[in-house]
Amino acid sequence: MSGNRSQSYERAALDRFAAEPAWLREQRALAFAAFERLPLPTTRSEEWRYTDPAQLRWDQVRLAALDSGTSCVDRAKRLLTGKLSAGRVIQCGAHIADIVLPEELRARGVILMDLAEAAREHGMLVESHLARALPLEAGKFAALNTAFWSAGVFLFVPAGVRIDAPVRIIRWVENGGLAYFPRTLVVAGAGSEFGLVEEFASPDLDDPAFSNGAVEVFASPGSRVRYVALQRWGRNMHHLSMQRTVAQRDANLDSLVVNLGATVARVELHAALRGPGARSDMLGLYFAQEDEHFDHSTRQDHEVPHANSDLLYKGALDGRSRAIFRGLIKVFPKAQRTDAYQTNRNLILSRQAEATSLPNLEIEADDVRCSHAATVGQLDDDELFYIMSRGVPRPEAERLVVFGFFGEVLERLPIPTVVHELREAIERKIRK
């Protein structure tokens, strides 16, 4: 989106967002100015060394129309079959096509709605959080999303409210050649407890498509929030997701990032621990095949004393696939009594697959417990032989090994109803 392409997007923004509140229109204008001003990342920078932004095909697509894809609601709903939920949102193309929230939760003050509508109806609440964890200056792609987001979702759970079943967002697209800019904003009141599962899916696409998404999750003191991002786009989708979480005093903010699809997928997850007693468990699971390219960039920012974080990312790679993990634990000068851990493990299933793991520590306090670990290993021949000696064919034996490898992550997921769904999704991926 450079040259004439970026100018056409500026005009589209003026047309399509004219009915929004003045503060939001101004934010979009500032974001577009930042997008034009900020440099495009290059492989010369450490953060993008292994993924050229050109691989995302971001400048080879056009902005999706806001009403595109509304006919796909029924197909998107199939992804919810048999799944327990406390509320749901369905995106078709670049449009929010369906929202369901039980009256019981509405009566307790829960808000689940289109982000653009929330900006009008709950302006102060949205304005005080939107683009605060992921500011305009975070980078060119962050600014691009803030300028052009659509199909936004806003979830607010008031203080003290507990929701047992997860809230679900289904983001479904069917058309290639387009750019999509989903945005999710979650605000948890003090002492609230709930889970959110956001699923990205599509068929295989004939033409390249680009999804540039942003997620901001704010956990107030004493809240417990669980966020799951399940990415299983079809071929020819190019996925960029910028996720930011903020945990205040005694809040638990856990995340699980699952990458099972797309031709190229890059996820940037930054967790900020800003209150004593805050905790963040950061789980990741990925399975790449053929020539898929997955890039994970994580940060655990310990800004205050007495906070805890524990990251575990595990991936299996087959075919000619490539996976990159780059993680940083940053302990700020006054963040004494920090406990922070980071582990990345990769299982290589073919000779052509490749994994790169780059864990890092940046510690500016002297009373902390921090560690990191990374492994890249092949299938264990002895383990395979043991399974096959009991009459199990090799493909089935490999499947069992992969499930055993992922088990450590799945067992730590604090939403039991979702574990079975993830196992089924992994099963489908293995058998492709």
Image (cartoon, helix red, strand yellow):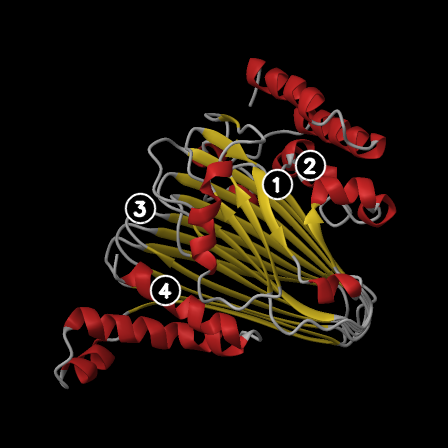
In three-dimensional space, the C-alpha distance between marks 2 and 1, rounded to whole angstroms, equals 12 Å
At label 1, the amino acid type is Ala
Q: In which quarter of the image is the C terminus?
A: bottom left
Q: Are marks 3 and 4 in contact (CB under 8 Å)?
A: no
| Residue picked out by circle 2 | 146
Q: Residue furthest top?
A: 4
The answer to whether 22 is drawn above or below residue 308 in the figure is: above
Percent of width and height locating residue 363: 71, 64
Q: Residues within 10 Å of mark 1 (few under 14, many from 20)?
A: many
Q: Mark 1 points at which residue?
A: 151
Residue 351 x %, y %: 23, 57
* Mark 3 crowd level (few <14, some 14–19, many ≥20, 10 Å Cα): some
Mark 3 element type: loop
Q: Nearer the N terminus, badge 2 or badge 4?
A: 2
Do the CB atoms of the residues marked 1 and 4 lie less than 8 Å apart? no
Callout 4: 10 Å neighbours few (<14), some, many (20+)? Answer: many
Query: Element type at marker 4?
Result: helix
In whole angstroms, how far apart are the C-alphas of marks 3 and 2? 31 Å
For marks 1 and 4, give the one nearer the viewer.
1
- Between the C-alphas of marks 2 and 4, the distance is 32 Å
Residue type of the residue flagged with mark 3: Asp
Which disc, if any, is residue 338? Answer: none
Number of numbered labels in the structure image = 4
